[in-house]
Image (tube, coloured by chain):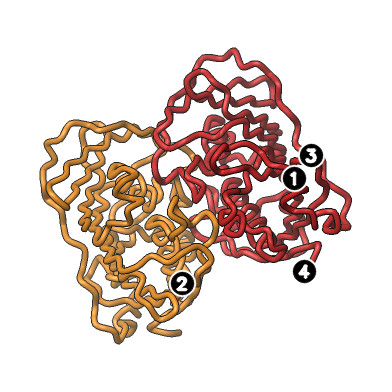
Chain colours: A orange, B red
């Protein structure tokens, strides 16, 4: 049972964007899959939690992007638990390709009761976390975004079946992909994203109509998702 | 250089739908990735074609679904070229999991000139195809759907950056996912889909506004995508 978990992924056809490089949502998919594999090894998998009426949910993410490789490259992911509190744990990911840095990603997780949808005390359900902190220095934690968004809706999206995951809510990486899409093709195909802070505020469900609001000031892009006027997600994206 | 190409994939976290089973779009991703790997082995990869101003595009797909496995299962994919004509080739896929049939999928491909977007003579660009037909009997080819759709629009979707692929057009499996989403959560989470015929009529581009039309008669679901009144895609889905 390792404090550090390592795995590899090949950048597949559908992981590439129009430039032929790994897309940020595809990188996010591999981050979440790796988290799941490490949790299985640590005996705290989503399947195990489900049998007790609980599940993992992600409350925040921070991406520091270095260099996204091309299709068919091999990604090396290394992950560790970098810290924890009574109700949350920080899991960090170090992603490389042929020895070059691809991205550093910090995530924060809660365990919730699937009936009440409220957090439980993580250290009660997963007491062994005290012995599982990894050896690498923790990455910068995601920033809480408190900007009150004043922008008008840029668009509305209805959540479809293909957007939801095994928890029957909007898949975390779909929040991210929808938010990044507001930046438009010129910025995205220019591969200009350097840093992303994402705050998962509330669960978005099948059939919900999401209002996407976005605002840009120089190289800082703020995006907010609302459902019926309530903030569900916020992201701040820094471009060069 | 094998007539049959075999590969494996683990059903990852993001490949599962709300039921925890492999989703049909995720299966489609693996089918296309496998096609790409076999094309590299045969010396007719998308990258090689790109250097000559050409690319592969898919004109049709037929899925016969048997049993979609759960998350973390290992899929075995086997593919072969099952037939060809002057301008198209049929590539079939046989997907199993632990010896059980998952799905049989037949696809049809063209090579197009990336400037004119028109098909070229496949047998001129890829003459070695004559010696590469696989040994398994061909699967049933996809059906041409000629139904004139009279239904009103069910919804409109604007193509975002995350929907387009390395060819800078709507990724084939996104056509399929958008079409399947029209069936709604009850049918999709009931895992009732048995057969899909998909016809890729025309390229849909970034920023296009897609009108989705759908009609259901007993267990047959017809879906059509239009852009500015022109038919771009048709699918027929059979459920139990």
The local secondary structure at tag 1 comes to: strand
The C terminus of chain B sits in image quarter: top right
Marks 1 and 3 close (CB-CB < 8 Å): yes
The local secondary structure at tag 2 comes to: strand
- Binning the other alpha carbons within 10 Å of mark 3 as few (below 14), some (14 to 19) or many (20 upward) gives some
**Residue B186 in view here:** no
Q: Share a chain, discs 3 and 2? A: no
Q: Share a chain, discs 1 and 3? A: yes
Residue A79 is labelled as none
| Mark earlier in primary sequence (3, 4) | 4
The local secondary structure at tag 4 comes to: loop
Residue B1 is labelled as 4
Report whether A1 appears left or right of B1. left
Q: Is residue B214 above or below residue A49?
A: above
Distance (Cα) linking label 3 and label 4 = 25 Å
Distance (Cα) linking label 1 and label 3 = 6 Å
Residue B167: image x %, image y %? 51, 47
Q: Is residue B154 above or below residue A53?
A: above
Q: Which residue position is annotated with label 1?
A: B106
Distance (Cα) linking label 3 and label 2 = 36 Å
Q: Which residue position is annotated with label 2?
A: A75
Q: Share a chain, discs 1 and 2? A: no
- Binning the other alpha carbons within 10 Å of mark 1 as few (below 14), some (14 to 19) or many (20 upward) gives many
Marks 2 and 4 close (CB-CB < 8 Å): no
Residue A75: image x %, image y %? 46, 72
Report whether A173 appears left or right of B68. left
């Amino acid at each position: 049972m390792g404090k550090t978990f390592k795995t590899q992924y090949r950048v597949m056809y559908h992981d590439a964007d129009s430039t032929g490089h790994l897309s940020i949502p595809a990188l996010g998919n591999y981050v979440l899959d790796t988290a799941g594999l490490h949790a299985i090894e640590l005996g705290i998998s989503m399947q195990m939690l489900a049998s007790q009426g609980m599940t993992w949910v992600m409350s925040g993410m921070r991406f520091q992007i270095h260099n996204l490789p091309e299709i068919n490259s091999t990604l090396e992911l290394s992950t560790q638990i970098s810290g924890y509190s009574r109700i949350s744990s920080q899991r960090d990911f170090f992603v490389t390709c042929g020895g070059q840095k691809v991205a550093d990603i910090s995530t924060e997780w809660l365990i919730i009761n699937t009936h009440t949808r409220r957090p439980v005390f993580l250290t009660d359900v997963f007491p062994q976390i005290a012995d599982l902190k990894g050896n690498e220095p923790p990455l910068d934690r995601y920033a809480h975004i408190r900007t009150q968004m004043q922008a008008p809706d840029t668009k509305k999206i209805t959540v479809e079946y293909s957007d939801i995951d095994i928890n029957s809510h909007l898949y975390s990486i779909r929040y991210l992909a929808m938010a990044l899409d507001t930046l438009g093709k010129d910025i995205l195909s220019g591969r200009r994203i350097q840093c992303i802070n994402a705050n998962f505020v509330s669960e978005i469900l099948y059939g919900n109509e999401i209002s996407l609001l976005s605002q840009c000031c120089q190289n800082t892009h703020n995006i907010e998702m609302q459902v019926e006027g309530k903030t569900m997600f916020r992201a701040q994206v820094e471009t060069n």
